[in-house]
């Protein structure tokens, strides 16, 4: 199967390939054909693409120079770095991930990064992993004393002989060689690098494109040549060779021994030598067998790690937890399972690309790890899910403390290239033995609690409660039912007045979505919006809301009921995708004939999270059209003040969580005053949400808040009821 590149049909393309010594990825033995995983894959692709391969063996640094000068077309087994990416072209697909791992001797108390502090750690001189570990430890206040040696085998030797407490080697080496009986692998994995194919900057992109095309397919199939090659090179350990001839050697030597014994005493000395040799070989055989077993054990372990972050994966996690649970049961101890889901990672992937999402995940993994204790276990389940096992729990507040620390660790912005990203997570907590006593049910319960935390808006943790389960079961059918709701016209809008606090006059209203479900009655948006956002159904729903709301206001205007009134519509950040929001707004306005000045779009603060050129330009276009923009739920999410200044918002909606605390303590009132002052400074109008008491109303009015909305003035109302309120207000004005 060819990718159909132009040259594939005519002359065979000659690809000059730089090879060097880096087994098992690539190896170029003198006088023999190059071999290794990278070569296997390249040959496989070359066969299908009709390429002729011309190998150029040389030292690594020479190959890099060749690549610079364009004297080779491909360099195999080249680790990707940002600096290199600006100099060369890389295949998009990586060949294999490699990362640093830390081993300790059996008695050293080292499990996670902070435990390295002050310890002696063997590193291979000039290895990038070694340098990375030194820097990582320094960043997390875990500086150690590096002890430099020349090779990875020397690192392991230093650990085995206890010259050092621990040593760092790379994962591929570890898979093949790190099986000393007295040496134990720790949970510390770091500095993941990915090995790719590289081409000169000016090269025809077709070669890399073909490699990418095939590699992607090969990697997707567990039974492909790719996995055959990995197994062949990562599992091929020397004992196989010994195993075949050693029994014969043992037998042969035994015969020699018997003969020697039979002949004469003068041969005794020689016999003794032979015996010694025989014993030595027998011991060697045993050692090899032990090592072989350890190697297999270790290979299994490698299968238990996640290649992006180097953390244990789901399998690794299950094993660890199962082991721990057995121990705990015997000692009557407790533990907590924290299921962490990164909020809105999908937005980041969609907005900035998966590369950025991956970088963010790596940084998140480091942050999470950095606040955990030595005996807590962090693993990644793939996607945006992490799980922490917190052992040694005495009170539930211990779990709470860890969850708080984890959430706080994500609070500072992340930097992905030039972009600043705000992140948060939803955490569900299940306790052993109170909530469950098996790996599966603990996970299920923690997961359920996580969903609940997410439904409440994310950036929070929740403990599992038995009655949550039913709700999540309902979730599964929610998507289907919601789709039907849209088709069957079961959605409707309620309207809540927005009031000018000084005069108590209604100046506009916010449209709030409701679902009249034939089974459950009136369903509030909190129960289905986040699910509709996950599935993307929010986009057509949002378009329906826009049009229905605009049509309603236009009708009231034509009936002379709503002169000067504005309509606020909530929009989800997902509606920005592909600049769709601008088109939907234009369409709703033109179909209903509503003038743009009467429409306000409420966008939650989380829009800052996905702020890219596309979103930015949508906001500018909307403002250009004359639509007003308001920042909803201000203070609960990710506002960056520097952004706030640049973005084209008119209105800031102060979240009800602040309003509910006033008049209250001085601290709380101070926050409200600060938000009001901030809005004034930025020349934004403020609408206070959730005003429920006269005291709140008075405080806000006295402190210069112009507009408000809340149950005190009116709950959200069906259209008819609101029309009645509009009439009453007009009547009051005429008579009053
Ligand atoms: P929101 O935009 O912040 O809307 C204000 C929410 O506060 C509404 O809840 C409203 O009923 C409630 N509320 C108003 N006054 C008070 C009060 O005095 N006390 C209390 N405790 N609550 C008050 P609702 O209608 O359940 O909507 C919840 C959220 O769902 C909205 O928050 C908005 O984010 C989202 N939403 C509603 N309709 C839509 C929609 O059409 N599209 C999108 N994307 N989201 C929507
Ligand atoms: Mg709103
Ligand atoms: Mg709000």
Image: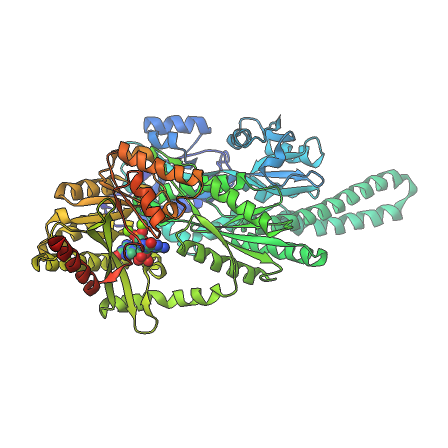
Q: For this view, does 380 lie left or right of residue 284?
A: left
Rendering quarter of residue 179: top right
Where's residue 229, x and y in %?
48, 49
Q: Is residue 661 left or right of residue 302?
A: left
The count of marks equals 0
Q: Residue furthest bottom?
A: 519
Relative image position of residue 581 (x, y in whole percent) = 20, 50
Judging depth in this view, the residue of 408 and 561 nearest the camera is: 561
**Does residue 349 appear in this view?**
no
Which color scheme did the rendering employ for the protein? rainbow
Q: On screen, 723 above or below 131?
A: below
Left or right, residue 369 beside residue 593: right
Q: Is residue 110 above or below residue 547?
A: above
Q: Foreground residue, 198 or 497?
A: 497
Q: Is residue 443 toward the left or the right of residue 512 in the image?
A: right
What residue occupies the far right of the structure in this picture?
A: 265
Is residue 270 among the parts visible in the rendering? yes
Q: Nearer the viewer, residue 270 or 96?
A: 96
Q: Position of residue 64 (x, y in %)?
A: 40, 28
Q: Quadrant of the N terminus?
A: bottom left
Q: Residue at x 82, y 39 (%)?
A: 273
Q: Residue 688: where, in percent of width, then height?
A: 30, 46
In the picture shown, does residue 199 fall above or below 506?
A: above
User: Where on the picture, by quarter, is residue 319?
Assistant: bottom right
């Amino acid at each position: 199967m060819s990718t159909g590149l132009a040259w594939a049909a005519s002359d065979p393309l000659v690809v000059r390939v730089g090879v060097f010594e880096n087994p098992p990825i690539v190896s170029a033995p003198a006088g023999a054909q190059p071999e290794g995983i990278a070569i296997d894959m390249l040959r496989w692709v070359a066969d299908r693409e009709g390429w002729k391969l011309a190998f150029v063996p040389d030292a690594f640094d020479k190959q890099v120079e060749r690549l610079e000068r364009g004297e080779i077309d491909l360099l195999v087994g080249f680790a990707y770095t940002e600096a290199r990416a600006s100099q060369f072209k890389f295949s998009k697909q990586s060949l294999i991930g490699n990362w640093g791992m830390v081993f300790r001797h059996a008695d050293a108390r080292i499990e996670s990064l902070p435990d390295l502090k002050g310890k002696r750690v063997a590193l291979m001189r000039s290895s990038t992993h070694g340098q990375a570990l030194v820097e990582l430890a320094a960043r997390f206040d875990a500086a150690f004393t590096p002890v430099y040696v020349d090779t990875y085998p020397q690192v392991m030797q230093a650990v085995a002989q206890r010259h050092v407490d621990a040593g760092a080697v790379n994962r591929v080496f570890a898979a093949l060689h790190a099986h000393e009986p007295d040496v134990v692998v720790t949970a510390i994995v770091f500095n993941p690098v990915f090995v790719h194919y590289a081409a000169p900057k000016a090269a025809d992109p077709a070669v890399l494109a073909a490699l990418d095309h095939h590699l992607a397919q090969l990697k997707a199939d567990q039974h492909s040549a790719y996995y055959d090659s990995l197994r062949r090179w990562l599992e091929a350990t020397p004992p196989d060779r010994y195993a075949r001839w050693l029994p014969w050697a043992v037998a042969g030597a035994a015969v020699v021994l018997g003969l020697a014994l039979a002949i004469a005493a003068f041969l005794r000395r020689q016999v003794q030598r032979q015996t010694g040799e025989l014993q030595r070989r027998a011991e060697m055989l045993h050692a090899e067998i032990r090592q072989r077993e350890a190697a297999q054990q270790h290979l299994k372990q490698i299968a238990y790690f996640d290649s992006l972050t180097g953390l244990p994966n789901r399998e690794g996690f299950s094993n660890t937890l199962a082991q721990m649970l057995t121990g705990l049961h015997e000692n009557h101890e407790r533990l907590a399972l924290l299921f962490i889901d990164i909020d809105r990672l999908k937005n980041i992937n969609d907005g900035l690309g998966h590369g950025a999402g991956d970088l963010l995940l790596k940084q998140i993994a480091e942050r999470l790890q950095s606040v955990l204790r030595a005996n807590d276990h962090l693993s990644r389940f793939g996607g945006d899910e992490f799980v922490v096992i917190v052992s040694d729990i005495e009170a539930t507040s211990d779990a709470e403390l860890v969850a708080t620390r984890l959430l706080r660790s994500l609070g500072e912005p992340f930097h992905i290239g030039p972009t600043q990203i705000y992140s948060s997570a939803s955490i569900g907590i299940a306790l052993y033995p109170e909530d469950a006593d098996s790996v599966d049910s603990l996970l299920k319960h923690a997961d359920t609690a996580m969903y609940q935390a997410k439904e409440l808006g994310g950036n929070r943790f929740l403990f599992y409660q038995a009655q949550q389960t039913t709700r999540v079961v309902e979730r599964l059918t929610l998507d289907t039912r919601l789709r039907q709701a849209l088709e069957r016209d079961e959605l409707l809008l309620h309207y809540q007045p927005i009031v000018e606090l000084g005069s108590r006059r209604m100046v506009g209203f916010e449209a709030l979505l409701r679902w009249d479900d034939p089974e459950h009655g009136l369903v509030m948006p909190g129960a289905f919006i986040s699910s509709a956002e996950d599935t993307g159904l929010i986009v057509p729903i949002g378009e329906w809301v826009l049009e229905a709301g605009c049509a309603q206001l236009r009708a009231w205007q034509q009936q002379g009921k709503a002169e000067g009134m504005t309509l606020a519509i909530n929009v989800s950040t997902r509606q920005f995708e592909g600049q769709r929001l601008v088109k939907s707004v234009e369409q709703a306005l033109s179909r209903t004939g509503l003038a743009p000045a009467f429409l306000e779009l409420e966008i939650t603060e989380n829009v800052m999270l996905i702020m890219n050129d596309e979103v930015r330009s949508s906001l500018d276009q909307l403002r250009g059209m004359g639509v007003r923009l308001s920042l909803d739920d201000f203070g609960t999410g990710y506002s960056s003040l520097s952004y706030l200044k640049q973005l084209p918002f008119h209105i800031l909606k102060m979240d009800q969580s602040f309003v509910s605390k006033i008049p209250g303590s001085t601290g709380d009132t101070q926050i409200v005053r600060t938000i009001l002052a901030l809005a004034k400074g930025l020349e934004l109008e403020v609408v206070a949400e959730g005003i429920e008491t006269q005291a709140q109303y008075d405080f806000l009015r006295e402190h210069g808040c112009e507009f408000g909305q809340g149950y005190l003035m009116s709950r959200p109302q069906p259209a008819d009821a609101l029309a009645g309120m509009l009439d009453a207000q007009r009547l009051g004005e005429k008579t009053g």
